[in-house]
Amino acid sequence: VGVLNLSGGTIMEKKEVSGFQTVDAVLDFAIRKEEEASDFYSRWAETVDSKSISDTLAGFAKEEQKHKTLILEVKGGKKLDPPRKSITNLKISDYLEESAPSKDMGFQDALILAMKREQESFDLYSSLASMAEDESIRNLFDSLAREEAKHKLRLETIYDESILKEN
């Protein structure tokens, strides 16, 4: 695991951290991840037949754009306070198998895929937060991890109410 050092502008490696030589590089990577997530949810929202699924996915796309804006603000010098509370993890997706996204994907598979993506984002941002020496950068990644956990909780709640209670 590497350590981000904002004051020096470089990553000090304890273990290999591929591709990141500066804090800006890490932030640019995070920006690209948020853009990819937003694009994924937007494209997916356009292909599903269900209006409620489409609306939910479009909402996630907008939230991912807000995350990108937040990263850009921190990159520009904005300071963030640490997140105030943790988010409940229902761990529903821990026990489910993921399918590849497809146009004719069912509601259950769509929820599983989205939950898995949000968990991956949470894991990424939690890792980046643990490597950050600079408090503002650490707070950014902790905040982003918290946001991804909120998304996952929302999806798991929908899954619980729509899928598990029906079975």
Image (cartoon, rainbow, N blue to C red):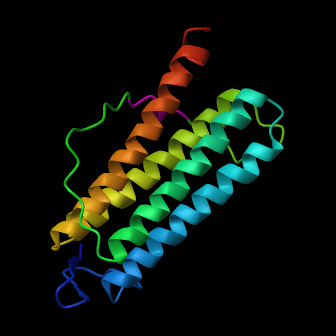
Please tell me in which quadrant of the rendered image residue 126 appears.
bottom left
Q: Is residue 91 above or below residue 122?
A: above
> Which residue is depicted at the point 29% across and 69% down?
78
Residue interval drawn in magenta:
91-96
Residue 164 spot, x, y in % from top left:
55, 14
Residue 66 spot, x, y in % from top left:
49, 55
> Which residue is depicted at the point 79% across and 29% down?
50
Residue 94 visible somewhere in the drawing: no
Q: Is residue 71 above or below residue 17?
A: above
Residue 108 spot, x, y in % from top left:
66, 28
Q: Is residue 166 above or below residue 96?
A: above
Q: Position of 154 compared to 26: left or right?
A: right
> Which residue is depicted at the point 52% across and 44% down?
116
User: Split into 4 quadrants, where in the image is the N terminus?
Assistant: bottom left
Residue nearest the viewer, comparing 97 with 153: 153
Residue 128 visible somewhere in the drawing: yes
Residue nearest the viewer, comparing 24 with 159: 24
Residue nearest the viewer, comparing 95 with 164: 164
User: Split into 4 quadrants, where in the image is the C terminus?
Assistant: top right
Please tell me in which quadrant of the rendered image residue 70 appears.
bottom left
Q: Give the number of callouts.
A: 0
Q: Position of 1 compared to 30: left or right?
A: left
Residue nearest the viewer, comparing 117 with 64: 64
Does the segment drawn in magenta span residue 94? yes
Q: Is residue 80 above or below residue 44?
A: below
Residue 140 spot, x, y in % from top left:
30, 62
